[in-house]
């Protein structure tokens, strides 16, 4: 089994910052990529940012220049530094990992339980 545990959500005023962290544990052979998605009330889940095992990153246009994703491959963790937060960033943020749980296992996606981020105006 693989577990992803997020931390760092909370309530912040517009213009403020938060840092989300996610740790993957359990039966992990290798992680290809990790990332963050978010889902606001009444909206579909959307991709926020992702980072591969060689450090390549990509971001949603709405967060470029404000959010930074980073990863510690040795610790199987991924972080999301969120600056200049806006009320429209309010959502539940989910960590995900695309990984192999064994040398003969298929590449599979795992999700964390989500952490609430609320940005007040």
Image: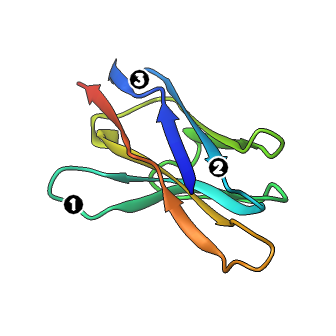
> Residue 43's mark?
1
**Residue 72 image offset from top left, x and y in percent:** 78, 40
Residue pointed to by mark 2: 26
Q: Within 10 Å of the Cα at label 3, are there few (<14), some (14-19), or many (20+) other Cα atoms?
A: some
Disc on the earlier residue, 3 or 2: 3
Identify the residue at horizontal 49%, vertical 48% (top origin): 63
How far from the left and from the top, in percent, is residue 82? 52, 33
Q: Is residue 91 above or below residue 81?
A: below
Question: Residue 119: x, y in percent?
Answer: 30, 28
Q: Is residue 100 above or below residue 23?
A: below
Q: Quadrant of the C terminus?
A: top left
Looking at the image, which residue is at 68% across and 41% down?
77
Which residue is rendered at x = 77% and y = 80% of the image? 104
For mark 1, give the secondary structure.
loop
Q: Is residue 95 left or right of residue 77?
A: left
Residue closer to the observer: 64 or 115: 115
Per the image, the residue denoted by label 3 is 15
Measure how far apart labels 3 and 2 are at the Cα level.
37 Å
Q: Which mark is residue 98?
A: none
Horizontal side, residue 29 vs residue 98: left or right: right
């Amino acid at each position: 089994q693989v577990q992803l545990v997020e931390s760092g959500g909370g309530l912040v005023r517009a213009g403020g910052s938060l840092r989300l962290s996610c740790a993957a544990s359990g039966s992990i052979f290798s992680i290809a990529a990790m990332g963050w998605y978010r889902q606001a009330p009444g909206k579909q889940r959307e991709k926020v940012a992702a980072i591969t095992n060689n450090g390549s990153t990509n971001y949603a246009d709405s967060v470029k220049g404000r959010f930074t994703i980073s990863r510690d491959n040795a610790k199987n963790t991924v972080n999301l530094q969120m600056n200049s937060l806006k009320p429209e960033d309010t959502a539940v943020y989910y960590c995900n990992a695309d990984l192999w749980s064994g040398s003969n296992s298929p590449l599979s996606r795992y999700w964390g339980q989500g952490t609430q981020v609320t940005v007040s105006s």
